[in-house]
Amino acid sequence: MKTVLITGAGGGIGSAIAKKFAEQGYFPVLHYHHSQETEQLAKSLNGIAVQANLAEISEIESMMQSVLHQTGHVDVLVNNAGISVSGLLTDISPDVRKNIFAVNVLGAIECTRILLPQMIHRKSGCILNISSMWGQTGASCEVDYSASKSALIGFTKALAQEVGLSGVRVNCIAPGVIRTKMLDCYDAETLDSLAEETPLGRLGTPEDIADSAFFLCSEQAKFITGQILGVNGGFVI
């Protein structure tokens, strides 16, 4: 049985990806930091849950050691975990900025670094990074978030070239406006406006991202690597 490890699996997109892979026969390993509901989700999907603060390398290493001990190998790594803080660049404290990059960028890189050797040894594996359309275009009042998600795009392109001959594929999804709890801070009028700005006339769903995630990690995408797939309803073209 193939194994998928999804970071930030307690969120709307992460949980949808977990369900999609489980439906397709994967053994799901669901990472979380705070959302202990992830343990219930993992149980319902006949998988396991693991906890770690991705801003701490020691916790990542401990988590990965546990994962490999329990599963033997990981076929697919989905670097989905991420945090966002809105505000003017001049209003964001250095500690908050450091944490954004620690989780969004370095956490993904360290998770990948630890799992790569067993993928390379088996000459098989997929790494999928979840960026954002703001990583492609930038967003006012989300400068640090945009920069961190842009870094994931660069990471994807560079690593794909580095490990391609080893049989490992690396791709990235840049979601648009997706209807998750992160949008709960917006009123109905704002959400309607965002939907109107989207050429397809609606907000995205976590399932939209999950479907694309599974495709990029499946045999149907075996000749696709180093690519950034915008799943945004045409919001960014």
Image (tube, helix red, strand yellow):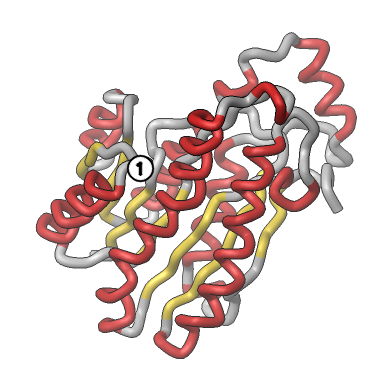
Residue toward you, 62 or 230? 62
Residue 26 picture location, percent across and down: 31, 57
Please give the name of the residue rendered at 44% of the width and 42% of the height, measured from the top-left corner: 103
For disc 1, the neighbor class at 10 Å (few under 14, some 14 to 19, many from 20) is many
What kind of element bears circle 1? loop
Point out the residue furthest to the left here: 69
Q: Quadrant of residue 196?
A: top right
Q: Quadrant of residue 1?
A: bottom left
Residue 207 picture location, percent across and down: 56, 40
Please give the name of the residue rendered at 80% of the width and 16% of the height, measured from the top-left corner: 190
Please give the name of the residue rendered at 62% of the width and 44% of the height, measured from the top-left corner: 208
Q: How many marks?
A: 1
Residue toward you, 86 or 115? 86
Q: Is residue 186 left or right of residue 32?
A: right
Residue 49 picture location, percent across and down: 23, 39
Please give the name of the residue rendered at 26% of the width and 54% of the height, measured from the top-left corner: 27
Query: Label 1: which residue?
Result: 54
Q: Is residue 234 left or right of residue 91?
A: right
Residue 163 picture location, percent across and down: 45, 81
Say which amino acid is labelled 1. Leu
Q: Is residue 226 left or right of residue 197?
A: left
Residue toward you, 148 or 216? 148
Whether 157 is drawn above or below 4: the answer is below
Whether 184 is drawn above or below 13: the answer is above
